[in-house]
Amino acid sequence: MSVTARRGSPPLVFLDTNVIFSGLYSPDGPPGAILRSIIEGKIVAVVSQQVLDELVRTLKRKLPHALPLLREFLLNSPLRVLRDPDPEDTTAWIDLVMEGDASILLAAISAEPDFFVTGDSHFLDNQRLRKKSGLTICSPAELLSNLEQ
């Protein structure tokens, strides 16, 4: 059974910075397909303020010509933006992730998504993190595969 059928609505996904960046950089790959699915209403996406801030900084540094694409995406998608968690709340996660990633992880947990989508191996390959967080952490390709089932 697909997540969509189970919930009766589009799946909620928390996107890591690298997924949005990759989708803007290479729209033909799985991250690009995810961005299109968000615009089409097939996926409901949520990010933290930190994710958006990182994305803008990274685009300015590595891909400045994509800033208009980001603006267009933000204007045309129902992207939800959560406030960042309090820094003192991240200390319980420092043993599993780097300090900067703990804030993103906590935001993902608070969003209660169906999937936390990332390209970062330190999230994807960390079984202890998966268990403690209760998140379904997957790559963009894995998300698309799950949604097709």
Image (cartoon, helix red, strand yellow):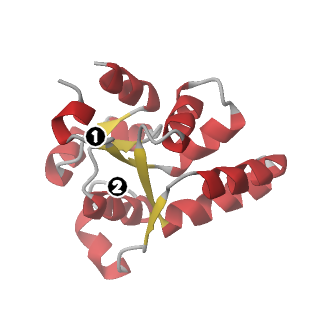
Q: Are marks 1 and 2 in contact (CB under 8 Å)?
A: yes
The disc, 1 or 2, on the residue closer to the chain's N-terminal end is 2
Identify the element where label 2 is drawn: loop
Q: Residue at x 35, y 37 (%)?
A: 124
Which residue was labeled with disc 1? 126
Report how far apart the C-alphas of labels 1 and 2 lie in the structure. Answer: 9 Å
Check the picture and name the quadrant holding the N terminus: top left
Which residue was labeled with disc 2? 97
Left/right of residue 91 with respect to residue 69 in the rendered view = left
Check the picture and name the quadrant holding the C terminus: top left
Q: Residue at x 27, y 34 (%)?
A: 4
Q: Is residue 66 above or below residue 106?
A: above
Which quadrant of the view contains residue 20?
top right
**Residue 58 at x, y percent in the picture:** 69, 54
Left/right of residue 7 with respect to residue 65 in the rendered view = left
Identify the element where label 1 is drawn: loop
Q: Residue at x 66, y 30 (%)?
A: 27
**Residue 34 at x, y percent in the picture:** 50, 35
Which quadrant of the view contains residue 5?
top left
Q: Looking at the picture, which amino acid does disc 2 mark?
A: Val
